[in-house]
Structures are given as structure tokens and as C-alpha cells.
Image (tube, rainbow, N blue to C red):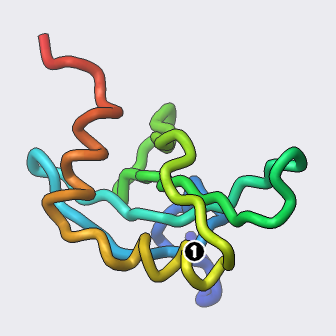
């Protein structure tokens, strides 16, 4: 039995900033912005998107893009990430999923 303080939903598969939740192919996905450090380019901020199934069950993992956002500030990276439309996020997610058999 769960105590009053325990959540019924599992912990997210990302420690990034939650951007939105999208629907794709009958499932819901939480979209997170994660930052990636690149010591060879110290004056830029680099971000990637992490797609985590909202109703994750054992064995499911998050899917991540490569670094797709490079800006002069973390605020600019977050602004660009928040500017993606649902159809763009769905396309990015689709590119990460295995081909249907």
C-alpha cells in the first residue's frame, strides 16, 4: 500500500527540464530539454531533447536526440526548445523509434 506522500506515477526517465507532453501513435510522451557540456566550445550552450513514455513500464527507456540546439545562452536554448510545435516534436520522436515491422 502506498503512503500519502508516494506518487502513483513512476519517476521520470530524465532529469532535464520538462517542456511538454505529446501524443504519438496512441501513446503519451513527456518531452524534456537536457543540456550537454562540450569543453571544446566553452562559450556555447548545447541542448538535446529526451522523450520519455508517460506511462513507462519496466524495461522502457527514454529516447534522446543528438545535440540539436546550440545557442549563446541557456535561456536561448530553452526558448528554441519551447518553440517546437507538436508536429515537429512528433517527427523527432518518430525518427528515434524503431521501424515498425
Q: Which quadrant of the rendered structure holds the N terminus?
A: bottom right
Of 91 and 100, the residue lying toward us: 91
Q: Which of the pair 87/72 is nearer the observer?
A: 72
**Image quadrant where one finds the C terminus:** top left
How many numbered marks have been drawn onto this rendered protein structure?
1
Q: Which residue is mark 1?
A: 17
Kindly indicate the quadrant of the structure image that contains residue 44.
bottom right
Residue 19 placement (x, y as % from top left): 43, 75
Which structural element holds mark 1?
Answer: strand
Question: Would you place residue 52 above or below residue 5 in this image?
Answer: above
Q: Is residue 11 visible?
A: no
Left-right relation of 38 to 69 = right
Q: Residue furthest bottom?
A: 4
- Residue at 66% x, 77% y: name it: 74
Above or below, 8 relative to 50: below
Residue 99: % across, % down: 20, 18
Position of residue 53 measured from the top left corner of the image (x, y, whole percent): 37, 51
Q: Nearer the viewer, residue 6 or 15?
A: 15
User: Measuring 42% from the left and 52% from the top, which residue is drawn there?
Assistant: 51
* Residue 89 shown left or right of residue 81 in the figure: left
Residue 55 coordinates in the image, percent (x, y): 35, 56
Q: Residues within 10 Å of mark 1 (few under 14, many from 20)?
A: some
Residue at image x 23%, y 38%?
A: 94
Q: Residue at x 14, y 60 (%)?
A: 87
Amino acid at each position: 500500500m502506498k503512503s500519502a506522500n508516494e506518487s502513483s506515477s513512476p519517476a521520470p526517465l530524465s532529469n532535464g527540464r520538462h517542456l511538454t507532453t505529446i501524443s504519438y501513435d496512441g501513446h503519451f510522451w513527456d518531452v524534456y530539454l537536457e543540456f550537454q557540456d562540450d569543453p571544446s566550445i566553452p562559450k556555447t550552450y548545447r541542448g538535446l531533447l529526451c522523450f520519455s513514455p508517460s506511462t513507462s513500464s519496466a524495461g522502457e527507456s527514454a529516447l534522446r536526440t543528438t545535440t540539436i540546439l546550440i545557442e549563446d545562452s541557456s535561456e536561448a536554448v530553452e526558448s528554441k526548445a519551447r518553440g517546437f510545435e507538436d508536429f515537429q516534436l512528433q517527427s523527432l520522436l518518430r525518427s528515434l523509434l524503431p521501424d515498425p515491422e
